[in-house]
Image: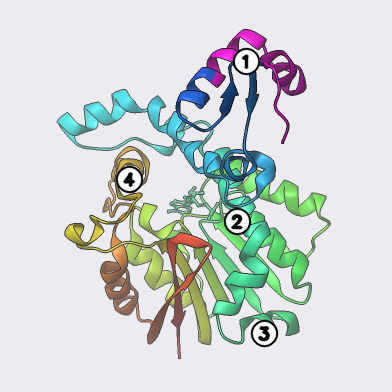
Amino acid sequence: MTTQTTGEIAGAARLDERYVREWLGGATTARLVEYDPRADTYLLPAEHAVCLTRAAGPDNLARLLGFLPQLALVEDQVDEAFRHGGGVPYSSYPRFQEVMAEESGEVVDASLVDTTLPLVEGMTERLALGVDAADVGCGRGHAVNVLGRTYPRSNFTGYDFSEEAVAFARGEADAMGLDNVRFELRDVAELGVEESFDFVTAFDCVHDQARPAQVLTGIHRALRPGGRFLMVDIKASSRLHENLDLPWGTFLYTVSLMHCMTVSLALGGDGLGTVWGEQKALAMLADAGFDETEVKGIDTDPFNNYYVCAKF
Ligand SMILES: C[S@@+](CC[C@H](N)C(=O)[O-])C[C@H]1O[C@@H](n2cnc3c(N)ncnc32)[C@H](O)[C@@H]1O
């Protein structure tokens, strides 16, 4: 990292110098950037860059905070919902799928194949031999496409009810030349599939559902005996007082209020919320019919639990 003037920084970023200088004022007083008053230059220390820049990989917190401008867009609608109930529909968040895919795509690239999949005992071997797998609430489908590329003998289906997301997912699959991957526009509460898959995944999407119990029951029904379901969802307690020490607890409840809970309520749904928690998740997985669920974790992902669920 080199120390630079505002003109040099603005030139490298192709941005307006006056705006860059004002932004650097805030970044300096936040202690993110170091300012040298004698040389009038700025430095972004390498250890800060890791958490703040796109090139830095999955530790980039800026990507996660990209949700905040989306939340700000619906402030008036949430205010209205506080007074009269109801919710804010997905259509009110124009860049939601894009922001979501940028955030989750980085994690998929960094850890899905090498770190996440091995949590499901024996699944990497089964995928290499050839199985049928599905991802519910797949969004823009990067996880499905990466799995399709990694395991050419297996077949993958991604389900989502967002037309924009499914179109993007299909485009990426075409660009990657994949013929073992397909995407279906479907309400996953009406999956309507019987014993067709050996492996189903759900990344960060069950707590958003309008009808989460039906989704989980449908996933259980869609699995063949011996199949596995990997549900990745927020790591928290279902008991509020046990979340007092969760450093990002307030962030999670805010995202829930202004997105996850309210999109569910907008569909007349349960409004489970982002912080539904482990106890509630385990109870719902058992109610859906899963015979055994193990709760696992990954050191590099303090935000999520990895529920490995078995259908015997
Ligand atoms: C938080 S995003 C996660 C997307 C993706 N799994 C990822 O990690 O990037 C939740 C996704 O669930 C989808 N979704 C929510 N309710 C759904 C439903 N009932 N049927 C199908 N998709 C649904 C949304 O469109 C959205 O793409």
Tell me the element at label 2. Answer: helix
Q: Is residue 37 above or below residue 98?
A: above
Magenta stretch bounds: 1-24
Amino acid type, mark 3: Arg
Residue furthest front in the image: 38
Tell me the element at label 1. Answer: loop
Residue at the location (40% across, 59% down)? 206
For residue 38, the mark is 1
Q: Earlier in the sequence, mark 4 or mark 1?
A: 1
Q: Is residue 86 above or below residue 264?
A: above
Question: Percent position (x, y) of residue 26?
Answer: 48, 21
Amino acid type, mark 4: Ser
Q: Is 263 contained in the magenta span?
A: no
Pointer 4 residue Cβ closer than 8 Å to ligand 1: no
Amino acid type, mark 2: Val
Q: Which quadrant of the view contains residue 46?
A: top right
**Viewer-side label of 4, 1:** 1
Name the main secondary structure of what is drawn in magenta: helix
Amino acid type, mark 1: Arg
Residue at the location (57% across, 45% down)? 60
Which residue in the structure is indicated by mark 2? 107
Q: Earlier in the sequence, mark 1 or mark 2?
A: 1
Which residue in the structure is indicated by mark 3? 126
Which residue in the structure is indicated by mark 4? 256
Q: Is residue 73 left or right of residue 164?
A: left
